């Protein structure tokens, strides 16, 4: 296949690009390099520097891809709270621009949505048909993106796929960013800095390894009937438990600093993976311990 990956120079995108190249796809990357990095794009892929907030029709017409993986996003919940206009421009308008370009060449889009930020607070693993109650503009924008995919599917008969991702972690996640607690914890432990835990640390997330997400994306590309699928482990891990696991993999002893809770942050969020298992054949295979070890191996060498 010839596949276009928006956001392919970013953390998750680079893992998807590698997985596509491993199966011998011709891969093109569209990225504005605001947070993505040129060095994340393998030499076998072609980088096109562009921004999804602008129409991408000309590039898509030129490439005539067989499919588009849409990962380009503003991915920080706190940024969305502080600047919902920016979040909307990237995550809603950007998605519409990609869908419009895809429509004109009749190709399927696989969209990286979000699990926790869409469902809101969870008392059990969230299922795809549960109520969507986002608590942040980021979750709202991603839900809007899903609805645009569903609407375009009904209008134009090309069946798009939305993947509701858990908290993705792994190599190439920025340890100096504001999002991505695994990379932040491991980066601070590497540098001998104290880690911060917001609130009491009992808030839980479903941590899913980047290579598992890449595999789910490839399965989504093969899904001709479209649909919405959770991509997670079905297991919840608290921030305190995660911090202890990071200490274990680093082999360190360090006390974290507790700070005030942040606006828009969920207390409990994890995903039911059964629909993806039954329909896509996807189950996350990487344990948290193994994923943290691989991430630490990358961060300490970075």
Image (cartoon, grey):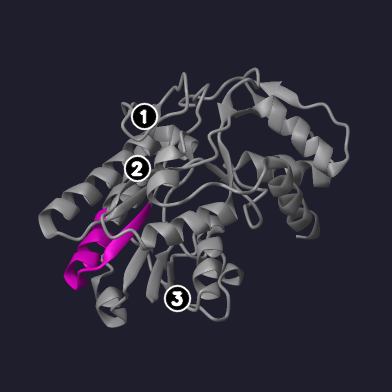
Label pair 2/1, CB-CB below 8 angstroms: yes
Q: Residues within 10 Å of mark 2 (few under 14, many from 20)?
A: many
Location of the N terminus by quadrant is bottom left
Residue receiving disc 2: 142
Q: Residues within 10 Å of mark 1 (few under 14, many from 20)?
A: many
- Residue at horizontal 45 percent and vertical 22 percent from the top: 122
Residue receiving disc 1: 134
Q: Earlier in the sequence, mark 1 or mark 3?
A: 3
Q: Position of residue 109 (x, y in %)?
A: 31, 60
Closest to the observer: 175 or 237? 237
- Residue at horizontal 34 percent and vertical 42 percent from the top: 142
Q: Is residue 268 left or right of residue 220?
A: right
Task: Report which quarter residue 2 is drawn in.
Answer: bottom left
Residue 59 falls within the magenta-colored stretch:
no
Task: Report which quarter residue 82 is drawn in.
Answer: top left
Q: Earlier in the sequence, mark 3 or mark 2?
A: 3
Q: Position of residue 161 (x, y in %)?
A: 32, 53
Q: In the image, which residues are magenta?
A: 96-111
- Residue at horizontal 51 percent and vertical 74 percent from the top: 23
Location of the C terminus by quadrant is bottom right
Q: Residues within 10 Å of mark 3 (few under 14, many from 20)?
A: many
Residue receiving disc 3: 27
Q: Position of residue 184 (x, y in %)?
A: 68, 42
Label pair 3/2, CB-CB below 8 angstroms: no
Closest to the observer: 39 or 113? 113
Closest to the observer: 83 or 159? 159
Q: Is residue 276 left or right of residue 243?
A: left
Q: CA distance from mark 1 to mark 3?
A: 33 Å
- Residue at horizontal 45 percent and vertical 51 percent from the top: 281
Viewer-side label of 3, 2: 3
């Amino acid at each position: 296949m010839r596949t276009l990956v928006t956001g392919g120079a970013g953390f998750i995108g680079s893992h998807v690009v590698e997985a596509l190249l491993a199966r011998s796809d011709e891969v093109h990357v569209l990225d504005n390099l605001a947070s993505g990095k040129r060095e994340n794009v393998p030499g076998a892929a072609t980088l096109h520097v562009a921004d999804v907030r602008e129409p991408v029709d000309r590039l898509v017409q030129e490439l005539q891809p067989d499919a588009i993986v849409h990962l380009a996003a503003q991915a920080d919940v706190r940024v969305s709270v502080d600047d919902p206009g920016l979040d909307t421009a990237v995550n809603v308008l950007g998605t519409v621009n990609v869908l419009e370009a895809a429509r004109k060449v009749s190709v399927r889009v696989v969209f990286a949505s979000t699990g926790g930020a869409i469902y809101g607070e969870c008392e059990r693993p969230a299922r795809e048909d549960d109520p969507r109650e986002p608590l942040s503009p980021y979750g709202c924008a991603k839900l809007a993106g899903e609805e645009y995919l569903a609407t375009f599917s009904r209008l134009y008969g090309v069946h798009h796929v939305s993947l509701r991702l858990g908290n993705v972690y792994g190599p190439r996640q920025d340890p100096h960013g504001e999002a991505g607690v695994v990379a932040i914890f491991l980066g601070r432990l590497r540098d001998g800095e104290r880690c911060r835990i917001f609130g009491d640390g009992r808030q839980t997330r479903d941590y899913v390894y980047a290579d598992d997400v890449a595999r789910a994306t490839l399965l989504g590309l093969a899904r001709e009937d479209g649909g919405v699928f959770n991509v997670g482990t079905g297991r919840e891990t608290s921030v305190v438990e995660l911090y202890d696991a990071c200490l274990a993999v680093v082999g360190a002893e360090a006390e974290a600093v507790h700070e005030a809770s942040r606006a828009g942050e969920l207390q409990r969020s994890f995903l039911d993976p059964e629909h993806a298992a039954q329909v896509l054949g996807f189950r996350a295979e990487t344990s948290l311990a193994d994923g943290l070890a691989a991430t630490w191996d990358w961060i300490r060498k970075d």
